[in-house]
Each structure stands twice: as structure tokens, then as C-alpha cells.
Image: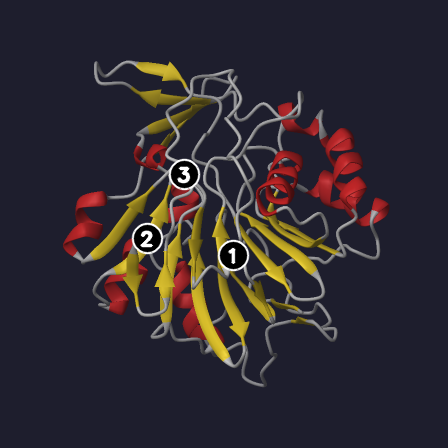
Amino acid sequence: MCLSDGISLNSLQSGSKLSAPSFTTPTTGIVRLQTVDSVDATIVVDNSIDILLASTSNVIRAPLTWDWSRRPQLVAEHGYSLLLRVHKKGSVKTILYDAGLSPDAVTHNLAVLGIQLTDLDAIVLSHGHADHHGGLFGVVHSLGKKNLPLVLHPDAWKNRKIRFPSGVEMHMPPPDRRALEKNDVQIIDSQAPSLLLSDHALVTGQVERVTDYEKGFPYQYEEMDNEQWEPDPWVWDDQGIVFNVNGKGLVVVSSCSHSGVVNVLRNAQRVTGVNKVHAFMGGMHLTGGIFEKIISQTVQDVAKVHPDMIIPGHCTGWKAMHLISREMPEAYVQGSAGTRIHFG
């Protein structure tokens, strides 16, 4: 299916809706993900910011300025968004992965960083939670670009809520499909793996669940047609993006990893047929009482994958980050809004 200049999306598996606790059915065969020369990932929105973090040869922090106290500054919030620039033989293609929580955090931070999205080729939504699509309409509206592809899983349209053991509830509304369609967004909702950017980027689609301790998000409920709320713990719409960097291996990007980060990594290896993981970047959802219990097992299994770099963010939580930095000190990179990481 042709989406726009230089972009193609190939559905590799139709898939059917699965009910808990079934595991997803693996795709047959290997996805032919083409190698790229490099990937630059800019953290547009994350839960934290530290302007004093030092840069390295491939981790570039947001620049400091003389009049910093008088100029608009980067903002942090409970949300996530990455800008991914993919380089191949002098060509550069750009994907926005998620759009944070508030309506204007993404556009604000991009302006502070001096980044324009005029060359944006596609938007990929990791899942339907509000802290990942809140700024989506603001981005689309500011671009005014017709037929901009938006790739997401069909379950991202579900109306959901989170019910905590304390009884507190939080509404998790889906993206506004009607508003997006009015702005000429080309919506592609698929459970299947999809190839973008001339087969140089893989949107994983529904992630295969193989571990016995990564069990989704037990506090989640979905609204049914009869206006009743039913448990919806598995977050089947959780999906990431994978690149294969020439001479390095896979760069696996995941926004919340509701599938479980170990499942996310193993799924990327299985679908691409590439065992070497160069980097993992994104949220690992290991914060909060029920998830802290699996931190040790998760970090142990991630370490077995031997990523060269790991940049945890968003919902990973400080306890998990501390353990990762202790167990994988050479690989660990502290994330911060405004940071750009060069892979390749």
C-alpha cells in the first residue's frame, strides 16, 4: 500500500482479536527489514529533564544558553515522544513515535530545540493511552500536511480507564479519530507487523507474549457497548519500532512496553531474524507496586540479551533504573527530554 513519497506499508499478518490469557500467534517467516546507516533518536517528551547531563560522542544533550532563564525551556511531563531520523545513503526519513500527554508539550519542546517537522514522513502510535497521544492533534494541526500516515493497532481506539487498588480511577480516552480524519490523516490500523520507509523501519504490531511474569496491566478496564466496564489487562495494542543498523544490530524502540520489555526484545529478534540487539530505548513499565516485584527478573533477562546501549525512560521507574545502571553500567544511558542519541 503506497502511503506517500518513499513510504510503503506491507501488512504481513492479518491476525485476529485475542482474548486473555492467550498468547499472540507468531508470524510465519522472517520480516525482511532492510539495514540503515544510522538512526538519530531525539527524546521530545519524557518524565524528567536534567540540563546538566554531560554529552558524549553519541549522546548529545540539549545545548545550554546564556539567557536560559529568559527563554522558553524544555518541559517534562508524564508522557513520552521520540523523533526518529533514519539515514540511508544520504537520504533522511523521519518518524514521530508518540506525542506525549498535554496538547502542546511536543510542539513546545520541538520549538525550543529548533526542530521543524516539515519533513515528517509518518507518525506511529505505541498504544492508545492518553500519555502517548495527547499532543497528537496539535502536531497534525500544526503541520497541515495531507495524507500523513498514522500507524496504530486497532485496540488503540478503545475507551479505557485505570482502576487502582485504592479505588482511584483515571480515564484513558482514545485518540479522537474524527478530528484526525478531518485533518486528512491517513489512518492505518493493523495488528500485523508493518514496514515503513522503504522497508527500513518495522512497526512490530501485536507483540508475542512468551514470558510467564510479564502480564500486562491488571488495573486496566475497557468500556463495552453496553456501557459496562470489563477487565482489559493485556494491552494488545502495545507496539514498538525496530531498525537494523548496519554493522551494529537492532535498535528497538518501545514507549511503555506493556507487553513486557523482555517480550518486546525477543519479539524483535524473532520477527527480524536478527539476534544482535544494539540498543533498547523507551519505557519499561516497572514502576508501581505490582511491577516492582518483577524488576529483578526483568533486568536479569534483559542483561542476557546484551544490548550495547539501554536508554530507559517514562514509566521505567527509579528503582528499575538504578538496578539497570548497576547491572549494565557500560550500556546504561540516562534519558532526559531534549537528548539526542546517535545509533550507528
Rate crowding at label 3 as few (under 14), some (14 to 19) or many (20 or more) other CA atoms within 10 Å: many
As drawn, the label of residue 150 is 2
As drawn, the label of residue 76 is 1
Q: Residue furthest left?
A: 182
Q: Position of residue 78 (x, y in %)?
A: 50, 47
Query: Disc 2 or 1, which lies upstream in sequence?
Result: 1
Residue type at mark 1 is: Ala
| Left or right, 193 with reference to 226 | right
Which element is circle 2 on? strand
| Left or right, 294 with reference to 48 | right
Query: Disc 3 or 2, which lies upstream in sequence?
Result: 3
Residue type at mark 2 is: Leu
Q: Which residue is mark 3?
A: 129
As drawn, the label of residue 56 is none
Which element is circle 1 on? loop
Tell which tag, 3 or 2, sits nearer the viewer. Answer: 2
Q: Is residue 240 above or below residue 231?
A: below
The answer for how far apart the CA atoms under marks 3 and 2 are is: 15 Å
Rate crowding at label 2 as few (under 14), some (14 to 19) or many (20 or more) other CA atoms within 10 Å: many
| Residue under the image location 76 percent in, 35 percent down | 301
Q: Position of residue 245 (x, y in %)?
A: 63, 63
